[in-house]
Amino acid sequence: MNSELVHNYLSDLQARTVAALEKIDGTPFRRDPWGRGTACVIEEGNFFERGGVNFSHVTGDNLPASATAHRPELVGRKWEAMGVSLVLHPRNPYCPTSHMNVRCFIATKPGVEPVWWFGGGMDLTPYYGFEEDAVHFHRSCRDALAPFGADVHPRYKKWCDDYFFLKHRNEARGVGGIFYDDLNAPGVSGFERCFNLTRAVGDAFTSAYLPICEKRRELPYGDRERDFQAYRRGRYVEFNLVWDRGTLFGLQSGGRTESILMSLPPVVKWRYDWQPEPGSAEAKLYTDFLPPRDWV
């Protein structure tokens, strides 16, 4: 297990991703080093209403109970967690929100083998769906995972559909993508495969997402579209604060709150028992895009 190798890759991934995002927005991100990481954030940009690309490398002596409840072998181990996590909220409602995360966890104890694993994924959350955009995003995910076996993408695609699901709403957050966790294999070659897969996911994000933004960024919109965007952003907030394990772990393990909650959108609305007008573009999101399907 080569912690330094993973650290260097993740730090470089953040820098490359931010550079690509600055190019599409035309506005520099704010760099905010905080001791155990760096938050790169944009607010009120030319294209992104809010976005952040975080790198963190945090350590501790004891994990919170929520992390050890199902993994008793982690009790009493020192641990380190590092990763890059990003969430992007464009202003134009025809441009989807997107999230990507790649991470590594290591727990050590004298005299025993370390426990380690990788996790990650990316997903797309449109407000007004375009089938060709969903197809492009999912095919990019498939192509990134293709070198690791034909069975990998279908499993990680379903894992994403199951994970990014608001159980209290019986509703998907978006059109999915890929998600995986607890990725581990014995030996040096096992580590290399897991690390290479994680790198493939991280490296594929900009080519999966930014062409969609370029295609939709000039579409005209008005108050109706912005209003629906704010309403659907409420679902994003609900998922992140109620169901997301990364948010829970970060807050319970003493992570930096500003970095953890940068994923929340800047303008959000909730309404009581609101329903879209039948046959409308808003209704189409619910009928044609949110139900899981094979986009590839």
Image: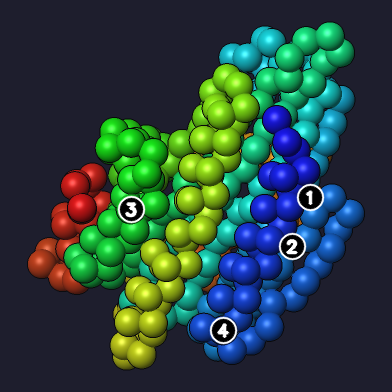
Percent across and percent down for residue 279 are 10, 67
Is residue 12 shown left or right of residue 38? left
Which residue type does callout 1 highlight?
A: Arg
The reply to whether dot 2 and dot 3 touch (C-beta < 8 Å) is: no
In the image, what residue type sits under mark 4? Lys
Closer mark to the observer between disc 4 and disc 1: 4
Residue 75 point in image, percent of width and height: 76, 13
Q: Secondary structure at mark 3?
A: helix
Q: What separation in Å lies between label 1 and label 3 (alpha carbons)? A: 34 Å
User: Looking at the image, which residue is at 89% across and 54% down?
Assistant: 35
Residue marked by disc 3 = 143
Q: Amino acid at mark 3?
A: Asp
Quadrant in which residue 132 is drawn: bottom left
Give the label on residue 256, or none.
Answer: 1
- Mark 4–mark 2 Cα distance, whole angstroms, equals 18 Å
User: Dots 4 and 1: beta carbons under 8 Å?
Assistant: no
Disc 2, disc 1: CB below 8 Å?
A: yes
* Residue type marked 2: Ala
